[in-house]
Image (cartoon, rainbow, N blue to C red):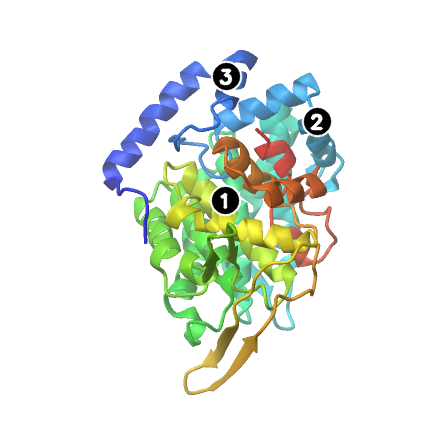
Amino acid sequence: MSGTQHIPAASRRDLLKAVAGIGAAAMVGTTAVTALAGTAHAAPSAAGHPGMLHTQADFDRMAAAVNAGTQPWKAGWDVLIGNSHSLPTWTANPQSVIYRGGGSENYGILYNDVAAAYQNALRWKIQGLTAHGDAARDILNAWSGKLTAIDGSADRFLAAGIYGYEFAQAAEIMRGYNGFDLDRFKTMMLNVFYPPSNSFLVDHNGAYISNYWASWDLCNLANVLAIGILCDDQAKIDQAVTYFKTGAGMGSVLNAIPYVYNDQGLAQWVESGRDQGHTMLGIGLMGTVCEMAWNQGIDLYGYDDNRFMKACEYVAKYNLGGSVPFTEYTWHYGAPGVWEGWQTFTAVSADSRGQYRPVWAQLYNHYGVRKGLSVPNTKAYAQLVQPEGGGGDYGSTSGGYDHLGFGTLTHTR
């Protein structure tokens, strides 16, 4: 296995802060944005804050493009402002306990409010209207002042992971905003969202290590990484990066992508024999982890000779109607001493083939634009689904809120 060179924790964080200070001083006006956008082959650059899915340089690029009416950013912006979650009149409905799984389910309240916080934060950061900033701030403050626990069936781990990493994105954007209680929000993330994600990555709810598919690991991995960045907690950042590379569960990169076909530039995603919806969910979540790490100066996108890029090409090619190789895979599920079973997948599954998920713009713009690599299938899928929307644009069920979306606006380079 190959990986990025280790940089001592203190040195890396100091570098992030130093470069962020230089960037903040230098990034003034459209000219600077245009110059930065042209550095397609630049190495990972330290972002400081904001430094999760978006950096200040990213926001400067978005604002310049939207103000100029440049496509496809303008089309992405139009989708954002057309979404009801992005309206400044959105009112939070915080709960003391969120349940996912079981008879008391109320998690839809949370994912709708998270989407509204993020979308209003985007509109404020790009357009500068305080009404949107106030709306995002008020949603974040409302939840950090009331939420005490995430409960339910095993699905509570999905709730903690998905809505945790998404909530952290909105808070990172709103950092320093007048009246936003960042310290209280951090406390909520550390006390409510981190423990279930950490528990899941450590013991997987007492199940066999292969019982839970890759997306379970990846959403919780994304949450741990996001909390680490939000709270300047290097131990949590390192925890996420280490698990990505060498974790025992299905979501670590070598387990999520078990078979590589180097002669074709493709790699099989572990759930490809199950269905394409969960496959794309996992692809999107791994992309989220990679982008956050990249913005902290850590290249997971390129880990193990661009293993993830080859999986993106594989998934995109099949979902565009192409044929891909497939290696037989046997899944072992259950819990020790309780129950167990095995299921063998012999062919790639056509279930949910061609599904639209707003994850492809980010993937193409990293590999194809930022790195200048040939990813024709990823590019074609990004073009197929653009302009990407977000929560509220892909139905009202939880699957439509698994990704924050709006990649055409936020990630096009």
Spatial distance from mark 1 to mark 3, Cα to Cα? Answer: 29 Å
| Camera-side residue of 104 and 76 | 76
Mark 3, residue position: 35
Image location (x, y in percent) of residue 149? 50, 60
| Numbered disc 1: secondary structure | helix
Image location (x, y in percent) of residue 7? 26, 39
In the rendered image, which quarter is residue 343 located in? bottom right
Image location (x, y in percent) of residue 49? 42, 32
In the rendered view, tell whether residue 333 sits above or below residue 16. Answer: below
Image location (x, y in percent) of residue 280? 60, 55
Give the quadrant of the N terminus: bottom left
Q: Amino acid at mark 2?
A: Lys
Label 2, residues with CA under 10 Å away: few <14, some 14-19, many ≥20: many
Q: Amino acid at mark 1?
A: Ala
| Camera-side residue of 252 and 30 | 252
Mark 2, residue position: 74
Q: Amino acid at mark 3?
A: Ala
Callouts 1 and 2 close, C-beta under 8 Å? no
Q: Earlier in the sequence, mark 1 or mark 2?
A: 2
Mark 1, residue position: 168
The residue at 56%/14% (across/down) is: 30
Q: Earlier in the sequence, mark 1 or mark 3?
A: 3
